Image (tube, helix red, strand yellow):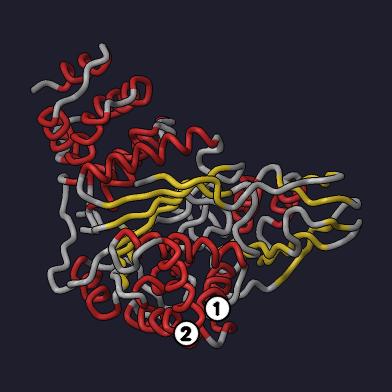
Amino acid sequence: MDARAILQKKRDGGALTREESEWFLRGYVAGEIPDYFASALLALVFVRGMEPQELAHWTRAMLDSGEKLAFPRVALPKVDKHSTGGIGDKVSIPLAPALAACGVAVPMISGRGLGHTGGTLDKLESIPGFRTQLSSAEFARCLENTGVALGGQTPELVPADRKLYALRDVTGLIESIPLIASSILSKKLAEGIDALVLDVKFGSGAFMVERERGAELARTMIRLAESMGVRTSAFQTCMSRPLGRKAGNAVEIEESFDCLAGGGPAELRELVCLQGGELLALTGREPDLEAGKRRIARSLDDGSARELFARVIAAQGGDPRCLDERERLPRARESAFVRSPADGVLAWRDLRALGLAITALGGGRRVLGDAIDPAVGLVFQVDEGARVTRGEPLVEVRHNGRGLDEALRRIEGSFELRAEHRPDPLILQRFGA
């Protein structure tokens, strides 16, 4: 085959065959096809899109570009979830042990924060000693011993995605539905899972702000995953306001612990029960979504999910005492407050600004290699839609002296006060069978 012929075919509106996708990606991973050919093909996909069967071939070729995880000693159904991310989205952390406490295994490969969104790995690593960089053998051992393994993508796992994502990032080719879907699902399918739930966000803090674009992504990923034998559904959920009362790293771990103790913000608990209940129904562990939601809620309330997470923390090198002794978690030295400039009803209008405020404090990355300060973050004092008075605290900014002025400016520009405001619904719609 010839890379130029493949580019010409895509340029002219043709669909790549399975053999063409396999040949191109195999050569790219091996270094035989240079970046300029790969970036040209990505740009053509960005403009031309991909037909469903073509996308399935491309995703399968990405999946086959490296090792795939297998857990022959784990007889339980294996499940995972993926969220497109946002501000305060910590659902994965309480969800994984709640699912395991209900009799399914959760091999969860997660990512790090970049741009305005936080990353599950960064949040977990704010637990003292917690290791997320696990070898395949360590990952399997954690899953066998606890029912949960929480790690990052290794160099051997879907290397085509690792190289293509970096190339998309520097060439401005991120927001393409076929490229997003193949990137997400090649990693998730490499986990050897039986069922998957997708949380596709909408609103100003979402990766895809527009609701219809998010719906298109959800439908594309469901169709693609189902074609590869993984039962999949999706929920489109709100990211026009923060999820929960805390955003950052260690502060979100605190709120996750609250959820595992049967408390915490109502919206966080609702999404944990919703997504967990859906996975229990998809695997046949419960007869339907409502029964699954009740089972997940019991695991949060009776302490079984919390007890299981203590075992996960210990298995991955962390200190489980921090579940009870919160002072063991990183804590910022100082606090400042953003106060209401007038009377009115709180409405968030630019949630990305909140994520960039956390980045300014050191809690996020401007580029991939930046170090994270796990202690900094935001604590929201009032809910969206609440009536506030002039001078009332709206956001506590926990900081260590870095980037405070920029963070305050960004937060002050992220909201407005209205005479009336009706917040968006938490759950917009469900996709799937």
Gap between marks 1 and 2 measured at Cα: 8 Å
Q: Is residue 367 visible to us here?
A: no
Residue 95 falls left or right of residue 132: right
- The residue indicated by pointer 1 is 262
- The residue indicated by pointer 2 is 303
Q: Nearer the viewer, residue 217 or 159?
A: 217
- Residue at (26% x, 45% y) in the render: 226
**Identity, as a three-letter code, of the amino acid under mark 2:** Gly
Most extreme residue toward the front is 287
Most extreme residue toward the top is 12
Residue 265 location (% of width, % of height): 62, 68
Q: Nearer the viewer, residue 423 or 347?
A: 423
Q: Residues within 10 Å of mark 2 (few under 14, many from 20)?
A: some
- Residue at (28% x, 64% y) in the render: 284
Q: CB atoms at circles 1 and 2 under 8 Å apart?
A: yes
> Within the image, what quadrant is residue 88 found in?
bottom right
- Residue at (78% x, 62% y) in the render: 337
- Name the secondary structure under disc 1: loop
Q: How many marks?
A: 2
- Name the secondary structure under disc 2: loop
Q: Earlier in the sequence, mark 1 or mark 2?
A: 1
**Identity, as a three-letter code, of the amino acid under mark 1:** Gly
